Amino acid sequence: MFYRIIKQQSFLPVLFLFVLSGQSLFAQQKNLLASKVTISLPADSLIKNLLRLELKTRNNFAFDPDQLRSIKIPEQLFVQTALSTVLEKILSGTNLVFSQIGNDIVIAPKKGVIWTIHGHVRDKSSGEELMGATLQIQALEVGVNTNQYGFYSISVPEGDYLIKVSNPGYLDFEKRVKLNGNRQEEIELLLKERQLEEVVIRQSIITPNPILRNELNFAAKQLNNTPYYAGETDVMKRLQMENGIKALTEGSSGLFVRGGNADQNLILLDEAIVYNPSHLYGLVSVFNADAVNNLQVYRDYMPANYGGRLSSVIVNRMAEGNSKEFHLNGGINLMSARLAVEGPIVKDKGSFIVAYRRSLLDVFHSKFKLFNPNSVYYDINAKANYKLNRDNSVFYSVYLGKDHLLSENSYTNDWGNLTSTLRWNHVFSSRVFLNVSAIYSNYSNLLDLNADTLSQKSQWSTGVKDLTLKADYTYYRTPSNQIKFGLSGIYHQFSPGEMFNQEAFEFNISRDKSFESALYYSQQISLSKLFELNYGLRLGFFRNSEEKRNIFDGEGNRLKKYDHKFFVKPEPRINISYLPTANQRFFVTYNLNYQYLQLIQNSTLAFSSLEPWVPASANIKPQRSNHFALGYRYSPANYLFSTSVYYKKLDNQLDLIGHAQIIRNPEVRDQLRAGTSNAYGVEVEMNKTAGKFSGTVAYSYSRVYRKISDINFGERFVANYDIPHELKLTARYEFNNSLSVQSFFTYSTGRPLTLPVGYYQHDGLNVPIFEGRNTSRFPDFSRLDVSAQYRLQSHLSGRRSLQHTISIGAYNLYNRKNPLYYHLNSSSFESKGSTIEYGFGFYPWVAYSFKI
């Protein structure tokens, strides 16, 4: 049959031969399309039904099977119907056309104008944009995902199509669209009554096949119903439950991702950089779950629009508020109380949300080893948006968080973050989307060095201020070819450390002013049905001016002098995926990243908020990472199996020499040493993602080694976040729509530390003697947490109802004593040179939340 010939060679040369046959051939041919046919076609593939039609009519059908293979048609019955009408019916919505050429009926893709459908996908109940929702045209086997602002664009030939839109936790939406020109479709999805709040890794943007991608995506509801400490829903603690993301110690919000240090994660809140994501030294993160819309985590391939860090990107998008109706929600647990209000500014055109949270440690007088129970924190999230017209929207968000911590001897430590973001979304055309952002970020930290002596009060401060302007463009060229490009500039002001309100004091660390900018281009393209390519190039520019302190002229006047340094660094990245079937993906990734900012860290401290940020300069080179990763994802029904291996070669890694101090040390930069780090690991994971029972089994093996001159005698040593073995188990059982239980278990190798091999006495103090760096380890770590939620709903009036959730749980169920840190005694009168401080034992809790 003719279709077999077409399958083996190009379709265009065959058509060309028919055209060359001349008008005489067409003059002699019989009009096959006018013949009548009676046939019943079952719901089956288009190819099989064309073969049935071919046998019935004894005509030859010519087509390329690869173009028709995925198309299915519904059951249809035809009685004495013209063959042309039959073909019109079964090809409807497929972008295929038919014509008679000679004595054959040729079926091929329609040639004509390409039109574009674009718009936003939103939550029907709240009007909030949905990031990562999938829009598919199954007849063409094409699809796209909405971007982080809920926008989509898909360009296809003219035709009549069935559009299907889906998003985890929402009912699927279908609509038939007759496309004969560019059109805007604003789509709203209905939330399912109940959903399993599990992590969903987005499917491919450029094909409708449900292939699971590498980045993690969390919706707001997926952060709930997890056994957190004291019932406090926490973004950073949720991330620490993921495979390959490690916590340095219990009660810390620090993230150590695939051999990277805590400062190598780019943490964004509505595009603003968050330099310290912790309350209470890390016991709670700064992200209020009531104000979270979506969370993305990139660990393998890092898109070129993100830069400045080596290990991961964590994108936290703040909730925008309900544009349909007003709501009040909040809750209370043993850690904090919170309240949020949201509603429309103008219905369906603008909305707002304001969320407030305050700690209750001073109310319940919870006992903690790290700080006085009278310590408090609070934070405020606020956001408003307004649609100026169908092509322009503006957004403004602000975050303010403060900590006031008291130690047992009344020393105080105050720190906080202030961020502000103004955004403008503009649709240039149906295929070009623009986001422009103006961003302010301010991190400040203040420590009282002798708070018990008010007359001689001395305070040490550190901080970073940023002003950012950026523009990001997305060009949806075709469903299988998407291009992003843009530019950004950040003006940094660094205050690494100085006596508060005493700028001229000789103990101050020199300030810096830096300008960091970048141009980027990235593309995501389908090379074929089996291969997908993501690649990008980021060109980074960094200029630093370091103020030189304590320089005087001959008359004793202080002089202001600066050391300047300029860097230009290209950062290529590429990801190639092989998709052998609809539920498998193999990928290989390479990223070259540079980081111009770094923390000066004292590795002997388990808990600290005083680590200052310093930029690359004349004496400090930017950090660099060459990151390679291989992975495999397989997703049969209701399951996900994944494995990956990675290797990182990190250069210009900084560490302080032994006994170096940070506070009141103006020469601290000179006590930094640079070297290399090598990190590698393997991660294996199995998820059950649907049904009453869901859960995860995840294991990782990883190593991190450092080699830095003047440290450990120049020999290689393990990093203090080297944790070779880690096992994480999560389980959740949903009895019904009201009751669920869940648990989390983790086991890991104890982290390294440096213990003294002896002491010598100096002025009545024990001074420790150290030999090798990180030659000892804490005991192995393990913990089991459990919790249960009971949800109920009470009718108030009209359509209003009160939804409440009562949660109970237990942290560290079997009361495992996990060490927090070693305390070195400096007094020569103490019999023990060091003691162990243990973490949080068995801790039962109860929590309540509501929404009106």
Image: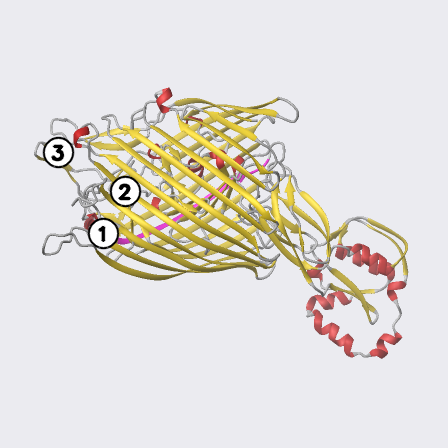
Q: Nearer the viewer, mark 2 or mark 3?
A: 2
Image check: 369 left or right of 207?
left
Kind of element beneath mark 2:
strand
Amino acid at pointer 3: Asn
What label does residue 101 carry, if any?
A: none
Q: Main secondary structure of the magenta part?
A: strand
**Does 52 appear above or below 271?**
below
Amino acid at pointer 1: Arg
**Does 377 appear above or below 273?**
above
The reply to whether callout 1 and callout 3 are in contact (CB within 8 Å) is: no
What label does residue 462 carry, if any?
A: 2
> Is tag 2's residue or tag 3's residue first in the polypeptide sequence?
2
Specify whether residue 624 is in view.
Answer: no
Q: Residues within 10 Å of mark 1 (few under 14, many from 20)?
A: some
The reply to whether callout 2 and callout 3 are in contact (CB within 8 Å) is: no
- Tell me the quarter of the image containing the C terminus: top right
The magenta segment = 675-690
Which residue is denoted by mark 3 in the rendering? 766
Q: Nearer the viewer, residue 221 or 347?
A: 347
Amino acid at pointer 2: Thr
Kind of element beneath mark 3:
strand
Q: Residue 268: within the magenta?
A: no
Which residue is denoted by mark 1 in the rendering? 673
Q: Nearer the viewer, mark 1 or mark 2?
A: 2
Q: Residues within 10 Å of mark 2 (few under 14, many from 20)?
A: many
- The spot of residue 269 in percent (x, y) is 44, 43
